[in-house]
Image: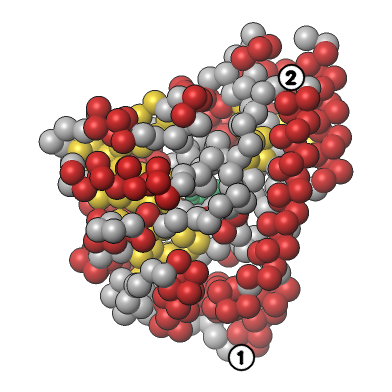
């Protein structure tokens, strides 16, 4: 059968390829998936159930129910001082995944270049390729905390460069950016006339300092597509709901694609999201407290057993170096899985700069984490 050339170009997700190995194995402790181990807080589930009982089962406005868009606007204003018009500057999407896809489709013409960091979240580059664009990878250095610097951007920008994708707190490294670092990036973004696609899905899980949305920086609102969602902080991965905020012409373009493809996000999920924003913060804080406790434990243990690891500032990932073992990321992860039945993700699943690293998700129960760390220690001793 004929398959599109663009689709043929993209590789299958490195995470999925590795987890094919896990499938079918018994008693594996998985530190692999980027998904909260909590269920969605009860008040959110209850609102959704009640909305079904009341008979809310229809399509909604393509942009999302106005009550939710108003709530998003109110929430972002109260939390970060952002000012988005619910009528024209907010679109409710099927997760950040759809928000990102729409953003790239809306701004990319064939041959346009979009900058992504390496290591990077697995979907960014393939979506750019599918849209006919060219993903330009910016290699980041462990010494810089795997963060993009203004210098990195200047170095790779040319006339075809249209946009840059930033993700913080970051998957896979767990690092985030301070306001000062973001301001440095904003200067280059303005100078080069770029659009910023800012994936801030983990912003609610920032541990050591206050999260700064990129669009809150002076002059950046008009050139930023701000992406956020409910999957991570509210433990709502299965509800498939997120949102995009941005300049009204870009949101209108994204809405045009969305109305021909998804039409709208399921109404039940939208009802649940309203409740999450209105009354979800306490549960987020509780989950965050537990993630923080796990972070302290995992990072201390990793460093103790000889896998040096910086302290991540957000999300629920640790990204330790395995260079001392002399194994490649894939060898390390495969052997750990076979010998000790602990699943982690090889750093190379996130791009070539991830070689020498593994990603560990601590969105896993404390007891399981403890056991996994003992197994990793035993594995290292036996090498
Ligand atoms: C950085 C990043 N962006 C987006 C997503 C997808 O989020 P959603 O469930 O909202 O589609 C993930 C999920 O792992 C992620 O890590």
Residue at the image position 26 percent from the left and 45 percent from the top: 187
Return the residue found at the far left. 159
Q: Nearer the viewer, residue 133 or 309?
A: 309
Q: What residue sits right under mark 1 in the picture? A: 54
Q: Quadrant of residue 342?
A: top right
Residue 287 image-quadrant placement: bottom right
Given contact means CB atoms under 8 Å apart, are the residues at marks 2 and 1 in contact?
no
Q: Of helix, strand and loop, which one carries label 2?
A: loop
In this figure, which residue is indicated by the disc labeled 2?
306
Q: Position of residue 332 (x, y in %)?
A: 67, 18
Q: Does the image show residue 239?
A: yes
Mark in front: 2 vs 1: 2
Disc 2: CA contacts within 10 A as few (<14), some (14-19) or many (>=20): some
Left or right: 156 in relation to 84: left
Compute the Cα span from label 2 to label 1: 56 Å
Q: Work out which quarter of the rendered image holds the N terminus and state it.
A: top left
Residue drawn at (63%, 36%) of the image: 311
| Percent position of residue 279, x then y | 63, 78
Q: Position of residue 350 (x, y in %)?
A: 50, 31
In this view, the residue farthest toward the front is: 180
For the C terminus, the quadrant is top right
Residue 17 point in image, percent of width and height: 57, 30
**Which label belongs to residue 320?**
none
Could you tell which of marks 2 and 1 lies nearer the N-terminus?
Answer: 1
């Amino acid at each position: 059968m004929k398959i599109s050339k663009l689709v043929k170009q993209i590789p299958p997700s490195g995470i999925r390829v590795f987890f094919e190995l896990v499938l079918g194995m018994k008693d594996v402790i998985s530190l692999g998936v980027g998904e909260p181990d909590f269920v969605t807080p009860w008040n959110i589930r209850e609102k959704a159930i009640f909305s079904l009982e009341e008979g809310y089962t229809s399509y909604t406005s393509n942009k999302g129910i106005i009550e939710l868009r108003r709530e998003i606007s109110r929430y972002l204003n109260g939390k970060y001082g952002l000012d988005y018009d619910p009528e024209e500057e907010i679109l409710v999407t099927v997760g950040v995944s759809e928000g990102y896809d729409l953003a790239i489709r809306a701004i990319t013409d064939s041959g346009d270049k979009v900058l992504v960091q390496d290591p990077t979240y697995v979907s960014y580059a393939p979506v750019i390729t599918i849209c006919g664009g060219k993903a330009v990878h910016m290699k980041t250095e462990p010494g810089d905390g795997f963060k993009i610097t203004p210098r990195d951007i200047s170095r790779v920008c040319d006339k075809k460069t249209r946009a840059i994708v930033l993700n913080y707190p970051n998957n896979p490294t767990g690092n985030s950016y301070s306001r000062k670092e973001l301001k440095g990036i904003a200067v280059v973004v303005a100078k080069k006339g770029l659009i910023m696609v800012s994936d801030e899905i983990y912003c609610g899980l920032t541990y050591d300092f206050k999260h700064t949305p990129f669009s809150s920086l002076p002059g950046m609102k008009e050139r930023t597509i701000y992406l956020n969602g409910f999957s991570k902080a509210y433990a709502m991965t299965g509800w498939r709901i997120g949102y995009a905020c941005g300049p009204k012409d870009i949101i209108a373009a994204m809405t045009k694609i969305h109305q021909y493809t998804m039409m709208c996000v399921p109404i039940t999920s939208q009802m649940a999201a309203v409740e999450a924003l209105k009354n979800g913060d306490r549960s987020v804080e509780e989950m965050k407290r537990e993630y923080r406790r796990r972070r302290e434990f995992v990072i201390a243990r990793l460093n103790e057993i000889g896998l040096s690891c910086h302290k991540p500032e957000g999300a629920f990932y640790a990204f330790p170096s395995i260079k001392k073992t002399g194994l490649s990321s894939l060898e390390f992860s495969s052997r750990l899985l076979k010998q000790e039945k602990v699943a982690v993700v090889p750093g190379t699943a996130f791009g070539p700069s991830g070689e020498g690293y593994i990603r560990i998700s601590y969105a896993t129960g404390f007891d399981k984490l403890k056991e996994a760390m003992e197994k990793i220690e035993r594995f290292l001793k036996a090498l």
